[in-house]
Image (cartoon, grey):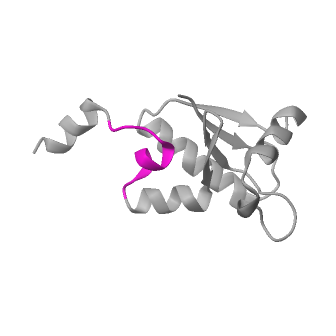
Amino acid sequence: MVIRVFIASSSGSVAIKKRQQDIVRFLEANKIDFEEVDITMSEEQRRWMYKNIPQDKFPAQGNPLPPQIFSDTEYRGDYDSFFESKESNTVLAFLGLKPSLASKKQESEP
Protein backbone atom coordinates (compact mmCIF):
# COMPACT_ATOMS: atom_id res chain seq x y z
CA MET A 1 0.00 0.00 0.00
CA VAL A 2 1.38 3.37 -1.04
CA ILE A 3 0.19 6.65 0.40
CA ARG A 4 0.22 9.21 -2.40
CA VAL A 5 0.04 12.93 -1.68
CA PHE A 6 -0.83 14.99 -4.72
CA ILE A 7 0.79 18.43 -4.51
CA ALA A 8 1.40 21.46 -6.72
CA SER A 9 5.02 22.57 -6.41
CA SER A 10 4.45 25.78 -8.33
CA SER A 11 1.32 26.94 -6.55
CA GLY A 12 1.13 30.68 -6.02
CA SER A 13 -1.08 30.20 -2.97
CA VAL A 14 0.65 30.41 0.40
CA ALA A 15 -2.27 28.53 2.00
CA ILE A 16 -1.90 25.59 -0.40
CA LYS A 17 1.88 25.47 0.15
CA LYS A 18 1.43 25.46 3.95
CA ARG A 19 -1.19 22.71 3.76
CA GLN A 20 1.06 20.59 1.56
CA GLN A 21 4.01 21.11 3.90
CA ASP A 22 1.89 20.25 6.93
CA ILE A 23 0.94 16.86 5.49
CA VAL A 24 4.43 16.03 4.20
CA ARG A 25 6.10 17.02 7.49
CA PHE A 26 3.61 14.99 9.53
CA LEU A 27 4.15 11.88 7.39
CA GLU A 28 7.95 12.28 7.52
CA ALA A 29 7.98 12.92 11.28
CA ASN A 30 5.89 9.81 11.87
CA LYS A 31 7.96 7.71 9.48
CA ILE A 32 4.97 6.94 7.26
CA ASP A 33 6.09 5.97 3.77
CA PHE A 34 4.50 8.07 1.07
CA GLU A 35 5.00 9.30 -2.46
CA GLU A 36 4.66 12.94 -3.46
CA VAL A 37 3.01 13.39 -6.85
CA ASP A 38 3.48 16.84 -8.35
CA ILE A 39 0.49 17.60 -10.58
CA THR A 40 2.20 20.67 -12.04
CA MET A 41 4.85 18.44 -13.61
CA SER A 42 2.55 15.81 -15.10
CA GLU A 43 -0.69 16.46 -16.94
CA GLU A 44 -1.41 12.72 -16.80
CA GLN A 45 -1.12 12.66 -12.99
CA ARG A 46 -3.29 15.77 -12.67
CA ARG A 47 -6.01 14.19 -14.80
CA TRP A 48 -5.74 10.93 -12.83
CA MET A 49 -6.17 12.84 -9.56
CA TYR A 50 -9.29 14.67 -10.78
CA LYS A 51 -10.77 11.49 -12.23
CA ASN A 52 -10.32 9.56 -8.97
CA ILE A 53 -11.72 12.10 -6.54
CA PRO A 54 -15.41 11.31 -5.91
CA GLN A 55 -17.77 13.85 -7.49
CA ASP A 56 -19.33 14.67 -4.12
CA LYS A 57 -15.89 15.91 -2.96
CA PHE A 58 -15.60 18.46 -5.77
CA PRO A 59 -16.11 22.13 -4.86
CA ALA A 60 -19.18 23.96 -6.16
CA GLN A 61 -16.99 25.57 -8.82
CA GLY A 62 -13.72 24.47 -10.40
CA ASN A 63 -11.57 21.49 -9.53
CA PRO A 64 -10.35 20.19 -6.15
CA LEU A 65 -7.10 21.84 -5.09
CA PRO A 66 -4.06 20.05 -3.73
CA PRO A 67 -3.12 18.54 -1.44
CA GLN A 68 -5.20 15.42 -2.08
CA ILE A 69 -4.41 12.09 -0.45
CA PHE A 70 -4.80 8.58 -1.84
CA SER A 71 -3.95 5.12 -0.54
CA ASP A 72 -2.90 3.33 -3.71
CA THR A 73 -5.86 4.24 -5.92
CA GLU A 74 -8.38 4.79 -3.11
CA TYR A 75 -9.23 8.41 -2.35
CA ARG A 76 -8.67 9.20 1.33
CA GLY A 77 -9.36 12.93 1.45
CA ASP A 78 -8.13 16.49 1.23
CA TYR A 79 -6.30 18.66 3.74
CA ASP A 80 -9.41 19.34 5.83
CA SER A 81 -10.07 15.60 6.19
CA PHE A 82 -6.43 15.01 7.07
CA PHE A 83 -6.48 17.84 9.64
CA GLU A 84 -9.62 16.45 11.29
CA SER A 85 -8.02 13.01 11.57
CA LYS A 86 -4.85 14.56 13.01
CA GLU A 87 -6.84 16.47 15.62
CA SER A 88 -8.76 13.33 16.62
CA ASN A 89 -5.58 11.18 16.57
CA THR A 90 -6.97 8.89 13.84
CA VAL A 91 -4.51 9.59 11.01
CA LEU A 92 -3.53 5.95 10.54
CA ALA A 93 -7.17 4.94 10.10
CA PHE A 94 -7.72 7.91 7.78
CA LEU A 95 -4.80 6.74 5.64
CA GLY A 96 -6.04 3.15 5.70
CA LEU A 97 -3.02 1.95 7.69
CA LYS A 98 -2.90 -0.33 10.69
CA PRO A 99 -0.98 0.80 13.78
CA SER A 100 2.44 -0.82 13.89
CA LEU A 101 3.67 -2.81 16.85
CA ALA A 102 6.43 -0.24 17.38
CA SER A 103 3.98 2.61 17.78
CA LYS A 104 1.88 0.56 20.23
CA LYS A 105 4.99 -0.19 22.24
CA GLN A 106 5.95 3.50 22.37
CA GLU A 107 2.44 4.46 23.49
CA SER A 108 2.49 1.94 26.36
CA GLU A 109 5.91 3.03 27.65
CA PRO A 110 5.85 5.47 30.60
State which region is magenta. 89-99
Q: Is residue 97 magenta?
A: yes
Which quadrant holds residue 103? top left
Q: Residue furthest bottom?
A: 60
* Percent of width and height locating residue 7: 72, 43
Q: Is residue 59 visible?
A: yes
The structure residue drawn at horizontal position 53% and vertical position 28%, both measured from the top left corner, is: 1
Of residue 40 and residue 76, the one placed in the foreground of this image is 76
The structure residue drawn at horizontal position 42% and vertical position 47%, both measured from the top left corner, is: 93
The quarter of the rendered structure image containing the C terminus is top left
* Percent of width and height locating residue 79: 61, 57
In-image side of 26 versus 104 (left or right):
right
In-image side of 107 versus 84 (left or right):
left
Which quadrant holds residue 43? top right
- Up-down: is 43 above or below 91? above
Q: Is residue 8 visible?
A: no
Of residue 40 and residue 96, the one placed in the foreground of this image is 96
* Percent of width and height locating residue 97: 43, 38
In-image side of 77 versus 30 (left or right):
right
